[in-house]
Amino acid sequence: MVVGHDMTPLVDALADHGHVVVPAWLPADAVQALRADAEGLWQAGRFRHAGVGRGADFQVRPEIRSDRVLWLDDAVTTPALDAYLGTMERLREAFNRALYLGLVEFGAHLAVYPPGAHYRPHLDHFRNTRHRVISSILYLNPPEWCAEDGGQLRVYLGRDPQGEALEVLPAGGTLVLFLAQRFWHEVLPAGRERWSITGWFCRRP
């Protein structure tokens, strides 16, 4: 799965702009395999309500975010997921070689937004921590997803959640990367089930 991908354009675009969107980065059969695995895990009751904060500060706040997630670890493994994580490991190594970012790991979770679910504007780092460096989202939805289906990712290009923004349709196979500590972003309400693998390339805490 995507073993032959050239990582250089991703690295260059991130270095130049701080964000990159690549439609159809993953072929349809690979997306379908990942989606099938995600749906199977969902049906098995493995997902949990997402929250905000971490540790003692963790709270489930559906008025802020209403998705469900399943973190990927040694207990959540399939050939398709393993292949995807292997590709992201290659990308981590490419970022370090070219940009000297000191990234030590990639952590990710599956995410599903039921119809009506959303995530209000936020930055991808916890209070008093800066170990998340690059955010990554791969969409597992049908490739024909349209604006009327909702669920767009809105990335604000300024220093706060207002003004000029980039809107990304969550069409299957689309990959989004952006600097976690720089870009405010939100997920607009979804009109149908919206699936993704969301992850972060991290330094040591």
Image: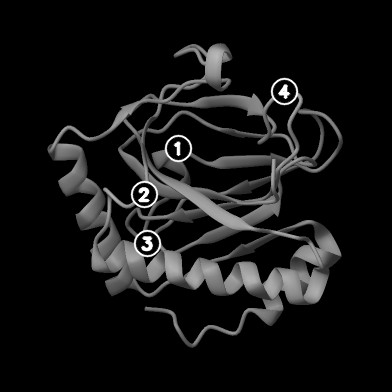
Near mark 2 (Cα within 10 A), the count class, few <14, some 14-19 or many ≥20, is: few
Mark 2 lies on a secondary structure that is loop
Identify the mark nearer the N-term, 3 or 4: 4
Identify the mark nearer the N-term, 2 or 4: 2
Label 1 or label 2, whichever lies nearer to me, is 2
Q: Residue 94's x, y, as percent?
A: 67, 75
Q: Quadrant of residue 64?
A: top right
| Quarter in which the C terminus is drawn | top right
Q: Find disc 1 in the rendering and name its residue.
A: 150
Mark 1 lies on a secondary structure that is loop
Identify the mark nearer the N-term, 1 or 2: 2
- Relative to 169, 8 lies left or right: right
Q: Residue 177's x, y, as percent?
A: 64, 57
What amino acid does circle 3 point to?
Answer: Pro
Near mark 3 (Cα within 10 A), the count class, few <14, some 14-19 or many ≥20, is: some
**Relative to the observer, which residue lies in front, 63 or 6?**
6
Q: Find disc 3 in the rendering and name its residue.
A: 143
Identify the mark nearer the N-term, 3 or 2: 2
